[in-house]
Image: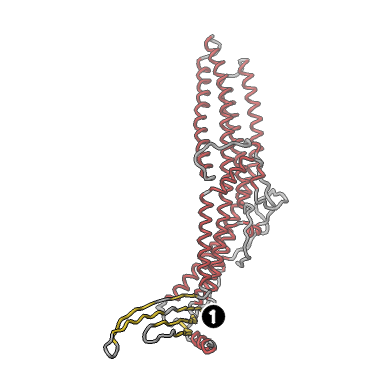
């Protein structure tokens, strides 16, 4: 049994020539092309080390490391992202199945009673198991291109899962930094409250013996109450921050263990990277590039829909019958078919145009993703540099305000200044120390955001993609 494919191939070429005008794939919009800058616009104070995959360990806080491990194991966003990868892998397998032959086994049996020519009733039973095979010759690459698109989409989903992982890690670190900043503010308020209570006790003792006025006593009482009322607000913020951390690490509501204080946390060392390096380190850029490549493959597959589909099929079976043939009979068939689109009411052209639009959308999305990445890095470079400058100014201000408070207290004790000067200096010092705590937290957060903007150290394993 020989299969003569030459006539089938000849007929395929003839049919392809009769399929009418096959649309040409247009080039991507010129404006979507992007040239990366050679250097950063903002100053980068970078180290000479490479990206650290476990960069959060540079903060040297074992409690934070444990929280990150819990987040990686239990965070729901990471788990959902993994289900997306599994779904994309299933779609890739479905697209690949079109490249393989289909094999079917069909078994049927019939039983019938009939009259023969002489009027005698007879019962016949027939069994016919059949093995069938069919295969589409992917002559013009329609199915191969669809499979390539599915594979690239799966890789893009893996990159999206990596981006989710980076986002969860960074959010956990930032949330922990915020929690430690709130702890520092609460500790400052509690220390201030002790000092205010001491001053109030002195004012009350002086008022009893007439050494101070009721005005100064009322001012001391007011200052003590003002500090006291700030503590419940800060404690509520701490509880809310703990709840937010519990959501990130996928845990039920519980108290978060504390590690290093805020001023002992070390900002991660920023690697020396050029803007072009974002293409290899930012998973969202890799994802957008893979989606663009997948849209190109889908567009090529849509173009191939205008060409004929060539299929071959074969079947082999055996017939068992009790009447009239007693011996089994082998049966077989083999053939080929060509399905060429002639008139589809514009459906193929509409599908092609839709694929062109999706490809162009992916090209614009890729450009937007790169521009956003550049903006995020530049924003964090600018923020970190200026927060360092602000920290230096705040430390100078704290020294000056502490000196002013010392002088105000001395002048008040010898009767040269009113108690109001002491209160003003105390308020200024509390305000500056609160700003210092918040600025320290902001700087650490900006450095974490910068590491995240540079790619987070998570390396995506993938095939090179031409953009």
Q: Residue furthest left?
A: 119
Q: Residue furthest right?
A: 48
Q: Residue at x 64, y 22 (%)?
A: 407
What is the image's colouring? secondary structure
- Viewer-proximal residue, 99 or 44? 99
Number of marks in the rendered image: 1
Q: Is residue 19 visible?
A: no
Using the image, determine if residue 184 lies above or below residue 213. Answer: below
Percent position of residue 421, x then y: 58, 23
Using the image, determine if residue 257 lies above or below residue 347. Answer: above
Percent position of residue 24, x then y: 52, 77
* Direction from residue 246 to residue 389 in the image, left or right: right
- Viewer-proximal residue, 92 or 403? 92
Q: Residue furthest top?
A: 209
Mark 1 lies on a secondary structure that is: loop
Q: Is residue 220 visible?
A: yes
Using the image, determine if residue 201 lies above or below residue 4. Answer: above
Q: Residue at x 50, y 71 (%)?
A: 356
Percent position of residue 446, x then y: 61, 45
Q: Residue at x 63, y 65 (%)?
A: 464
Using the image, determine if residue 282 lies above or below residue 192. Answer: below
Percent position of residue 289, x then y: 58, 63
Query: Which quadrant of the structure image shows residue 325?
Result: bottom left
Residue that mark 1 sits on? 139
* Direction from residue 407 to residue 114 in the image, left or right: left
Q: Residue at x 62, y 16 (%)?
A: 413
The C terminus - image quarter: bottom right
Query: Which quadrant of the structure image shows residue 181?
Result: top right
For label 1, count other residues whose C-alpha is less than 10 Å away and answer few (under 14), some (14-19) or many (20+). Answer: some
- Viewer-proximal residue, 201 or 462? 462
């Amino acid at each position: 049994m020989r299969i003569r494919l030459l006539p089938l191939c000849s007929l395929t070429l003839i049919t392809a020539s009769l399929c009418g005008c096959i649309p040409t794939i247009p080039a991507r919009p010129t404006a979507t092309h992007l040239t990366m800058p050679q250097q950063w616009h903002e100053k980068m104070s970078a180290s000479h080390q490479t990206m650290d995959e476990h960069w959060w360990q540079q903060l040297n806080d074992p409690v934070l490391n444990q929280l990150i491990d819990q987040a990686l194991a239990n965070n729901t966003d990471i788990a959902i992202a993994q289900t997306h990868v599994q779904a994309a892998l299933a779609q890739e397998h479905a697209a690949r199945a079109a490249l393989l032959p289909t094999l079917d086994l069909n078994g049927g049996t019939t039983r019938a009673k009939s009259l023969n020519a002489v009027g005698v009733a007879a019962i016949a039973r027939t069994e016919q198991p059949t093995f069938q095979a069919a295969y589409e010759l992917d002559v013009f690459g329609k199915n191969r291109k669809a499979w390539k698109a599915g594979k690239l989409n799966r890789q893009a989903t893996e990159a999206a899962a990596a981006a989710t992982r980076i986002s969860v890690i960074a959010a956990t670190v930032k949330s922990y930094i915020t929690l430690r900043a709130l702890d520092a503010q609460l500790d400052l308020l509690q220390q201030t409250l002790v000092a205010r209570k001491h001053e109030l006790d002195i004012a009350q003792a002086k008022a009893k013996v007439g050494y101070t006025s009721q005005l100064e006593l009322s001012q001391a009482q007011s200052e003590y109450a003002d500090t006291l009322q700030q503590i419940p607000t800060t404690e509520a913020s701490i509880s809310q921050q703990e709840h937010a951390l519990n959501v990130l690490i996928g845990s039920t509501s519980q108290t978060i263990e504390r590690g290093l204080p805020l001023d002992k946390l070390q900002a991660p060392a920023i690697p020396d990277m050029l803007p072009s390096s974002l293409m290899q380190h930012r998973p969202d850029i890799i994802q957008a590039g893979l989606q663009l490549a997948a849209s190109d493959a889908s567009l090529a597959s849509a173009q191939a829909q205008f060409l004929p589909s060539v299929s071959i099929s074969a079947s082999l079976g055996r017939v068992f019958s009790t009447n009239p043939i007693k011996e089994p009979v082998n049966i077989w068939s083999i053939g080929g078919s060509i399905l060429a689109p002639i008139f589809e009411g514009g459906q193929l052209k509409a599908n092609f145009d839709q694929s062109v639009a999706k490809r162009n959308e992916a090209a614009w999305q890729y450009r937007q993703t790169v521009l956003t990445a550049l903006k995020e890095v530049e924003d964090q470079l600018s923020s970190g540099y200026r927060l360092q400058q602000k920290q230096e100014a705040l430390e100078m201000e704290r020294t000056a305000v502490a000196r002013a408070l010392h002088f105000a207290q001395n002048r008040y004790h010898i009767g040269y200044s009113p108690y109001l000067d002491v209160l003003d200096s105390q308020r200024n010092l509390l305000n500056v120390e609160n700003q210092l705590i918040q600025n320290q937290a902001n700087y650490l957060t900006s450095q974490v955001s910068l590491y995240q903007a540079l790619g987070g150290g998570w390396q995506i394993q993938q095939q090179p993609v031409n953009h």
